[in-house]
Amino acid sequence: MDCENCGAPATPGLVACGYCDDPLPGMGPGVACPNCGDRNVATNASCVSCRTSLVKSCVFCGVASPFTAVYCVRCNESFVGAAERKAEREQAARNQQMIGLAAQGLSVIGSAVSTPAGQGFMSQLLGEVMQDITKPRKKW
């Protein structure tokens, strides 16, 4: 379809005339390229004119969404603050893992001190730790 304003042939993938920038009939609003400003069909992965990407990847699921999207099209996570939220969730998962490992370690220690040999070992270990803690330190 040609431009109704200047008669130029339509550029496939653009919603406005490449010459006079008038909207092409029946094409909808489209998406402005952040690099060159040409209005692309909303489903384009890259700008028809300059090849700039028109999608962004979700840090949670990796799926590409239009760069104008507020939420990921797959997992519905908001793009605003996504990297910070992911880092917080990963840190919380690491903390939970450390708590689980600490609980396992305490369980093993509890089992060990229930025997006379384990009690003797723990008594010796704690004595050495206390000596090390209370030992005078050199001041530099």
Image (cartoon, rainbow, N blue to C red):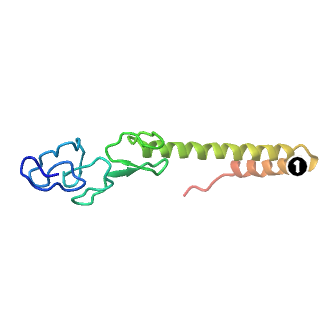
Query: Which residue does the image show at 80% across and 43% down from the upper left?
Result: 107
Q: Which residue: 27% across, 60% down? A: 51
Nearer to the camera, 8 or 42:
8
Q: How many labels does the image show?
A: 1
**Residue 46 in the image: above or below residue 86:** below
Residue 119, image x, y percentages: 88, 46
Task: Judge from the rendering whether residue 85 lies leftward or rightward of residue 137; answer left or right.
Answer: left
Q: Is residue 53 left or right of residue 117?
A: left
- Write down the residue under mark 1: 118
- Front-most of residues 91 and 73: 73
Q: In which quarter of the image is residue 11?
A: bottom left
Q: Could you say which is closer to the camera, residue 111 or residue 42?
A: 42
**Residue 17 left/right relative to 93:** left
Identity of the residue furthest to the left in this view: 6
Tag 1: residue type?
Answer: Gly
Residue 53 x, y percent position in the rendering: 31, 56
Residue at 79%, 49% in the rendered image: 127
Rendered location of residue 75, percent (x, y): 48, 42
